[in-house]
Image: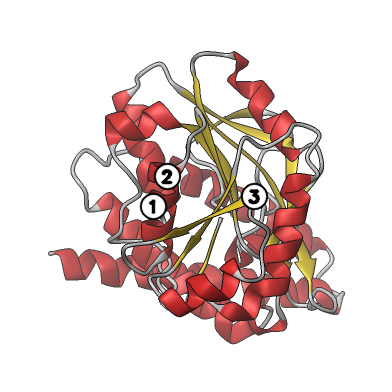
């Protein structure tokens, strides 16, 4: 877990409490902080001594995660966001998947906790915009390309073999780039040819969604940066086939979501959902196209 601001103290405490109350005890809880001594002093004075505070060498989510990995003692490193709360069986459900030696990574369900209520125009198919599991993902345990960053884990020896999360993509302050999880997972699966990354929906965390992210402007901006991020990933060498998950999602939108909404077009909610999904896909395409042109 990492944080970059004092403003999330309450969220950090809720997250830590959920980790301390796991049915399978955590070996340790590591909180990575941005390189700000004042921030370190702030959390040191407000958190209990059993939480290991670590100072990242640089700002940004990927840098924070990499610092946490290097300072973690366990054989399995689990990640959760500072504004999320883990179900009491989260860790036990996740760790049970590692009984299979071919499993190198595991992710689970990320359920949104809306500040207020879900906006009428915001369909479940777009929950990825707010960092949550979305309609169109598998509904049962299965092999996937990559997990969602708010709820994922990897064997620590994987990082020793393939390196860490790329710091050239991923969240950095208000810069909405993403894609560090798929980029890393792609490297893992290419290095360990028989390895598996598992999606286990029974491993659940609940992710806060503030009102500031539940608006159309944020959704379109986030969609644009998602496309831009995918262009960066696919610009890397040997990236053919890396967008299999995105292809499956588009097929689901075109083959399931849109036809079902069109059948009930007389409902305002369905029209709003159609407009939102269409606008999001167009922004993703725009970001992807611009990203590809920039790489030429």
Q: CA–CA distance between discs 3 and 1?
A: 18 Å
Vertical comparison of 2 with 37: above or below? above
Residue 144 left/right relative to 266: left
Residue at numbered disc 3: 50
Q: Quadrant of residue 31?
A: bottom right
Residue at numbered disc 2: 71
Disc 3 + disc 1, Cβ < 8 Å = no
Disc 2 + disc 1, Cβ < 8 Å = yes
- Foreground: disc 3 or disc 1: 3
Nearest the eye: 269 or 55: 55
Disc 1 secondary structure class: helix
Name the residue: 45% across, 49% down: 68
Name the residue: 76% across, 62% down: 14
Q: How many other residues sit within 10 Å of disc 2, few (<14), some (14-19) or many (≥20)?
A: some
Vertical comparison of 192 with 106: above or below? above
Vertical comparison of 225 with 258: above or below? below
Residue at numbered disc 1: 67
């Amino acid at each position: 877990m990492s944080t970059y601001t004092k403003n999330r103290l309450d969220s950090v405490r809720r997250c830590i409490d959920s980790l301390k109350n796991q049915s399978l005890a955590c070996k340790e809880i590591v909180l990575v902080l941005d390189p700000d001594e004042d921030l370190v002093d702030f959390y040191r004075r407000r958190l209990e001594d059993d939480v290991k505070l670590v100072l990242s060498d640089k700002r940004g989510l990927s840098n924070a995660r990499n610092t946490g990995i290097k300072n973690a003692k366990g054989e399995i490193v689990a990640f959760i966001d500072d504004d999320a709360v883990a179900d009491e069986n989260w860790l036990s459900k996740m760790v049970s998947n590692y009984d299979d030696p071919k499993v190198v990574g595991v992710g689970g369900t990320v359920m949104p906790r809306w500040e207020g209520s879900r906006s009428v125009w915001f369909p479940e198919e777009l929950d990825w915009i707010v960092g949550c599991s979305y309609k169109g993902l598998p509904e049962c345990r299965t092999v996937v390309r990559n997990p969602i960053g708010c709820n994922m884990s990897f064997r620590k020896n994987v990082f020793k073999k393939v390196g860490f999360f790329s710091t050239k993509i991923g969240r950095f302050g208000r810069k909405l780039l993403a894609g560090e999880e798929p980029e890393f997972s792609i490297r893992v699966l290419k290095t360990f040819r028989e390895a598996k990354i598992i999606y286990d929906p029974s491993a659940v965390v609940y992710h806060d969604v503030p009102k500031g992210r539940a608006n159309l402007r944020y959704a379109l901006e986030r969609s644009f940066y998602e496309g831009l991020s995918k262009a960066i990933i696919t610009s890397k060498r040997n990236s053919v086939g890396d967008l299999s998950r995105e292809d499956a999602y588009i097929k689901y939108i075109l083959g399931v979501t849109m036809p079902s909404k069109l059948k009930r077009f007389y409902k305002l909610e369905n029209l709003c959902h159609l407009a939102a999904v269409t606008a999001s896909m167009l922004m993703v395409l725009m970001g992807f196209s611009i990203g590809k042109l920039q790489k030429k």
